[in-house]
Image (spheres, rainbow, N blue to C red):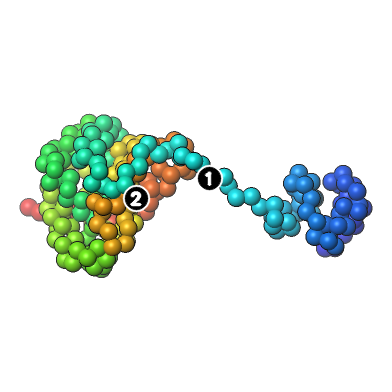
Amino acid sequence: MAAGGWTYAALAQQVEVDPKSVERWVNLGRIPRRATALQAAKALGEDVHALWPALRQARPARAISPELVALYEQRADLPVSAFTDLMARARERIDILVYAAVFLHEAYPRLNELLTERAAEGCTVRIAIGDPDSDTVQARGKEERFGHGIESRCRLALMHYKPLASTPGIDVRTHETTLYNSLYRADDQQLVNAHVWGVNAYAAPVWHLRRHEAGGMFDTYAESFDAVWTTATPVREEG
């Protein structure tokens, strides 16, 4: 108020309160009603929460997000068909971000054929798997008490996906990022397999998301995939 040349009376007149009220705000730390506080902050050119931090309200938590279709305690609770059926219905985009996820090929040997079919129908398919020689993959093996097992599974995943590298519409890359979640996206639906320190992915939770609004949970994970993708290295089929 001093910097702006405001008197108690002038500010009181601007926000339509008694000058004594303004005096109490300043000298006694009284807090005005929210609507009055917003008017006063606007007049002073200040942030209302900087003037009265107590007016800051926590954003109410949603009991259930409109984007959450289902929540599973662990990935092992989902049949592989939950993943493949999602991909089979895709019309525009399939994104897979994992370290290995060889369970897909082991339980569904037609996975490459499915992805090739979707690409032929116009789907853009992007697959990012862990670089078995990266420090992050080796660290994950130690964290999950898997030892070199995770590295060998990454090599196996690379062997499975490499034949797709020359398929039009399909791009396969390896990444060295710390993987916080494995992502399986098909158009506006996505399965998110959380990673928990010291726990194998099959025993960690999965949430099924359906895109509901711009900037929601779905977009947060989709943007995470895009960020990893820009750092990943393209895989070329040999021969």
Q: Horizontal placement of 73 versus 138: left or right?
A: right
x then y, percent, for residue 140? 26, 64
Q: Position of residue 100 (x, y in %)?
A: 20, 54
Real-space CA distance between mark 2 and mark 1, rounded to the nearest whole angstrom: 26 Å
Q: Secondary structure at mark 1?
A: loop
Residue topped by disc 1 = 61
Name the side, left or right, on which 163 lies relative to 127.
Answer: left
Type of residue at label 2? Phe
Q: Residue at x 87, y 44 (%)?
A: 16
Q: Residue, x 22% and y 65% (percent of image)?
A: 145
Q: Quarter of the image holding residue 25?
A: bottom right
Element class at badge 2: helix
Question: Looking at the image, which residue sits at the far left?
Answer: 239
Residue at the (64%, 50%) spot, across then down? 57
| Within-10-Å neighbours for mark 1: few <14, some 14–19, many 20+ | few
Q: Is residue 191 above or below residue 98?
A: above
Measured as percent of width and height from the top left, residue 170 is found at 22, 43
Closest to the observer, 220 or 66: 66
Q: Specify the label residue 225 is tagged with.
A: 2
